[in-house]
Amino acid sequence: MEKSFNYYLNIAISSIPESLKKPFFSGNGRYCPVCGNRLRRFLSYGLPGMPARPDALCPICGSLERHRLAWSVLERKTDLFDGAAKKMLHVAPEPIMERKFRQIAGLEYLSADIADPRAMMQMDITAISLPDGTFDLFYCSHVLEHIPEDRQAMRELLRVLKPGGWGVVMVPIGADRTVEDPSIVSSEERRRVFGQEDHVRIYGPDVRQRLEEAGFRVESITAGGIAGAREQQWLGIAENEVLFLCTRPIAQ
C-alpha cells in the first residue's frame, strides 16, 4: 500500500504547475539536467507493486534516472546541439523528452509509436515504412523489451539511419545475460520472469552484441562514464543505467 501511495502521490505532484512547485523544491542538493532546476532532493519513485527507488523522480519536470543520464550524454558526447540541420526519429515518445527535443535548434522532429495517439506517426519499428537513410539520429528508450522481434527492430533502426548517423538505445538491464522465452505469454508469468507484464524479455549487458550484430558500432555509456560519484549523486543518475550510443558506419 505504501508503494502505491508513493506512486499516486507523485502523479498528484506532477499535476501542480511548475511555478508553484519550484519554490517548494528549490535547493542545492540536486540538479536536473533535463529541466535545469536546482533542487533540495529528487523524490522516490516506483510503479505500483514494485519497490520505490529513492532519489529517482524530478519533482519539477518528471524526469527519471534514465532521462537524466540520456540528457547528460546527449549534451556531452553528441553533436545534437550544434545547430546544424538534422532529422530525428523518437520512438515511443516520453513527454518530457519530446518537449526538450522540440526546442532544439535545427532539429526536424518526428515521433512514432505503434498505438499511442500522441505520436506524430503510427509506426511498427519492425517494419518502418520510410526510405533507407531518412534520419540523422534516433532515440529509442525502454522500447525493445516490449517487442518480440527486437533484432528486426534493431535492423530497421539501422536501415532508416543515414551512414554516419547515430542513435540512442536504452533498455532496462536486469540480468547477467538476456533471458527470453516466447512461450511465456500470461501477464502473471511475464511479471514474475521479466519484471513487468508487458515485457517479453529481461536484458543483460549482451544486448550490445545484438545491436552490433544488427550492424551498429556501439559505445556503452554508464553514469561512471560521464561523471564521478559526487556528480552522479548531484544529477540523480544511477550506475546500473546503461545508454548504448549506436552509430551506423559510413562504409556499410
Image: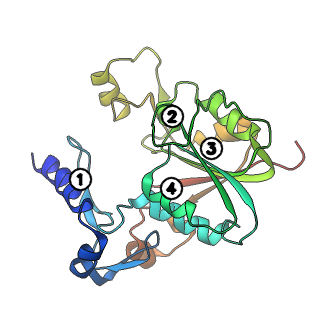
| Image coords of residue 244 (percent x, y) | 60, 52
Amino acid, disc 1: Ala
Task: Measure the alpha-carbon separation of dots 1 and 2.
Answer: 24 Å
Residue drawn at x 60%, y 65% as measured from the top left: 74
Residue located beneath label 4 in the image: 98
Counting residues from the N terminus, which is met first, the one under dot 1 or under dot 2? Answer: 1
| Image coords of residue 40 (percent x, y) | 27, 79
Residue located beneath label 3 in the image: 208
How busy is the neighbourhood of tag 1: few (under 14 within 10 Å), some, or many (20 plus)?
some
Would residue 190 be found to the left or right of residue 132 on screen?
A: left
Q: Which mark is residue 127?
A: none
How busy is the neighbourhood of tag 4: few (under 14 within 10 Å), some, or many (20 plus)?
some
Tell me the mark number nearer the camera, choosing from 2 and 4. Answer: 4
Residue located beneath label 1 in the image: 52
Counting residues from the N terminus, which is met first, the one under dot 3 or under dot 2? Answer: 2
Residue drawn at x 43%, y 58% as measured from the top left: 96
How busy is the neighbourhood of tag 2: few (under 14 within 10 Å), some, or many (20 plus)?
some
Would residue 209 be found to the left or right of residue 1 on screen?
A: right
